[in-house]
Image (cartoon, helix red, strand yellow):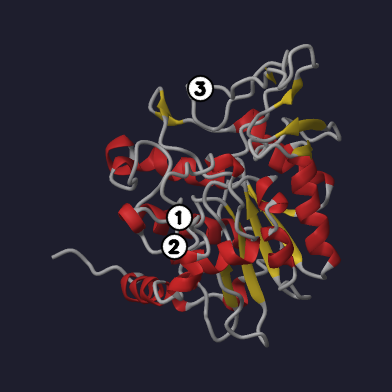
Amino acid sequence: MPQKSPYTRRSLLAAALTCLVPLVAFAAQTAPPAAAGQRRAPAGNRPQPDARTQEVGLGLEGPANSNLPTIFLVGDSTVRNGHGTGSDGLWGWGAPIADLFDPDKVNVVNRAIGGLASHSFISAGHWENTLAMVKPGDFVLIQFGHNDGPINIPGAKPVPDAAAGSAPARPATPLAAATPGAPPRPPMINVGGSLPGTGDETYEATGRDGKTETIHTFGWYMRKYVNDVKAKGATPVLCSLVPRKIWKDGKTVRQTSTFRGWTQQVAEQEHADFVDLNEIIARKYDALGETTVESLFGDPHTHTNMAGAVLNAECVVAGLRALPGDPIAKYLSPRGKQIEPYKP
């Protein structure tokens, strides 16, 4: 008989509580139906709900006990998938990691949002709302890269994301002028991503909503997260993006030269803690083999099921325990204390 997972009861309870979010919050995120004979505006032109409305709709919450320190999780769907309730069997590692900490000693608050990048998490207002909750003594774990797909500036060489063989970002192309003879409008591209690298380069681009925005590099955004957290008296921890289920020559494909490397570079420059999830988890996958790893995913190559999320969460704790001084040791649950610090 298979052994019962130690995460099941708490995970299901968390899922049930999340589903109790008031229905009015979800209604606020949905555009009203078009009147008879009236064509609905294109998605890109519809008014977008504010950050707080989106967060309520997704079930994002703050610390349960304000008197305790908090571990905040910031990232994409590999940290928190959808509403965080296991829809379609997909889970991020931010769900089971709560079971590795003692709720009487520390809060674990998962603020990650699927589909967002280092840039769009800030530009959409979610970072401002999260940062407002951070206090001295807290920890903020930050993991981005899967959705950052660097903006492919016209004439620049595309930079692929972590998925080997994935299609590069489409180049930004000028739109036709609205009036014959008028100059073309600025390039319209998906401005949710970031520029490649860690420098101070910027790029002015117009998004699908018609708004022009200044885009910075991936490293610029990661530095902002680090410095904002430090300014609050809390501890930032940069995490490299978790690996996708992609293999080459019997090994998990690492993401070395771009997002993983840029995250590590910023951590070193800013003297911030760094947990190399890309390598830590990839080593686990290599040891398990392709057949076993296949059973840990709920889609072709990116999102894990609960078993995969549990493995990734344990790797996160192993990486945290390997930091100088093992800063989270005193907050671990009995289950968390069984996880040994990662050894390269």
Residue that numbered label 2 is attached to: 84
Amino acid identity at mark 1: Asn
Q: Earlier in the sequence, mark 3 or mark 2?
A: 2
x and y, in percent, of residue 90 in the image = 36, 53
Name the side, left or right, on which 276 lies relative to 211. left
Q: Residue at x 34, y 41 (%)?
A: 299
x and y, in percent, of residue 106 in the image = 60, 79
Mark sitting on residue 167: 3
Amino acid identity at mark 2: Gly
Task: State yes or no: discs 1 and 2 in contact (Cβ < 8 Å).
Answer: yes
x and y, in percent, of residue 142 in the image = 65, 54
Q: Residue at x 83, y 44 (%)?
A: 269
Q: Is residue 135 above or below residue 116?
A: below
Q: Nearer the viewer, residue 197 or 56?
A: 56
Amino acid identity at mark 3: Ala
> Can residue 325 be seen from the camera position used here?
no
Q: Residue at x 67, y 23 (%)?
A: 152
Instruction: Name the image quarter holding residue 248.
Output: top left
Q: Nearer the viewer, residue 18 or 165?
A: 18
Mark sitting on residue 218: none
Q: Dot 2 lies on which element?
A: loop
The single residue placed furthest to the left in the displayed view is 1
User: What separation in Å lies between label 1 and label 2 (alpha carbons)?
Assistant: 5 Å
Q: Residue at x 46, y 69 (%)?
A: 338
Name the side, left or right, on which 12 lies relative to 59. left
Counting other residues with Cα less than 10 Å from the Cα at mark 2, is it few (<14), some (14-19), or many (20 or more)?
many
x and y, in percent, of residue 105 in the image = 59, 83
Q: Dot 3 lies on which element?
A: loop
Residue that numbered label 1 is attached to: 81
User: What separation in Å lies between label 3 and label 2 (alpha carbons)?
Assistant: 28 Å
Q: Earlier in the sequence, mark 3 or mark 1?
A: 1
